[in-house]
Image (cartoon, rainbow, N blue to C red):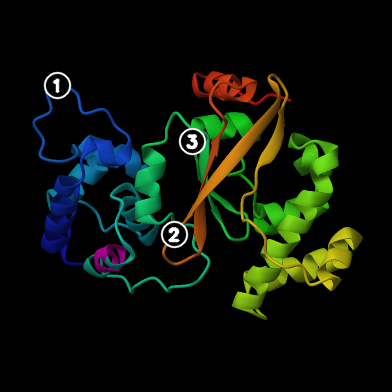
Amino acid sequence: MDRARLAAFLRTRRDSLQPEDVGLPRGRRRRAVGLRREEVAALSDVSADYYSRLEQERGPHPSEQILSSIARGLRLSVEERDHLFQLGGYAVPRQGRRSDRVDPGIMRILDRLADTPAQVVSLLGETLGQTGPAVALVGDDSGHTGLARSLHHRWFTDPGTRMIYPEDDHPMHSRLLASHLHATYARDGVGSRAAMIVDALLTASPEFAALWREHPVLGAYCAPKRIVHPALGLLELHCQTLVDPGRSQALQVYTAAPGTESHEKLRQLSVGGDRQG
């Protein structure tokens, strides 16, 4: 571990971030060039004292998990994260198509959408990040484990997953999700996580097996949706999608046409509505 260079690297990256980059207010009396130490600590889910000691060259040897959290908090690029690991005395994390780490550029955009229903998902429908209004709209999907992390898997195995959509729309969603999974499986091949999900669904879901035999072709990744909210009723929404450069994850932003009833319902979600029931 190179304690001095690690501390210097953390300071330079903290100084390069502005509050607006991470969705924080600037305030009138800010003197720091970039973010404050306590702000980076909060973004990284570590204590302010722990992070400060790292920058002051007197902290403990951080674990790989801690370094990953700090890399996420500082919005480091893949190359910067690798450098951070090397300074910490660890081998560079293996690269793979599946990553639980949100692309830094996508994360900066998500930070600026705090009052908008928006979320980041992998190409297998694994939720990597959500704004508060997105949780209020579709529920908190961050707590699932195993294959159930994938919306594609939950859709065909857990009937409760379908409750946020009108029943008439279920066949359309089934075909769309099967086509997404088919495209990801074709790209990643045998032995991939997509293949694991496909194998499990071919056994667990006759509906999926029937769709799979049709070789579904990929359609729009996030088509217009009708969502049923337990308190607000039906919302008719559009879903704009931004795919990261590596095409491994996507930012989904839910909007409604101005002046419509659905637009007003989205506004209510943005000021504190919860999804209950």
Q: For marks 1 and 3, give the CA distance.
A: 26 Å
Q: Is residue 37 visible?
A: yes
Q: Camera-side residue: 59 or 120?
A: 120
Which badge, 1 or 2, comes first in the chain's sequence? Answer: 1
Q: Is residue 160 visible?
A: no
**154 left or right of 139?**
right
Q: Which residue is mark 1?
A: 28
Q: Position of residue 42 (x, y in %)?
A: 32, 37
Looking at the image, do the residues carrying marks 1 and 2 touch, with CB atoms under 8 Å apart? no
- Dot 3 surroundings within 10 Å: few (below 14), some, or many (20 or more)? many
- The C terminus: image quadrant: top right
Q: Position of residue 1 (x, y in %)?
A: 21, 67
Q: Which residue is mark 2?
A: 244
**Residue that appears at 32% across and 47% down:** 73
Amino acid type, callout 2: Asp
Which badge, 3 or 2, comes first in the chain's sequence? Answer: 3
Tag nearer the camera, 3 or 2: 2
Instruction: State the mark number for residue 270.
Output: none
**107 left or right of 122?**
left
SS type, badge 3: loop
Q: For marks 1 and 2, give the CA distance.
A: 34 Å
Amino acid type, callout 3: Thr
Vertical comparison of 106 with 40: above or below: below
Q: Which residue is mark 3?
A: 131
Q: Main secondary structure of the magenta part?
A: helix
Q: For marks 3 and 2, give the CA distance.
A: 18 Å
Amino acid type, callout 1: Arg
**Which residues fall within the magenta stretch?**
80-85
Q: Position of residue 266 (x, y in %)?
A: 57, 25
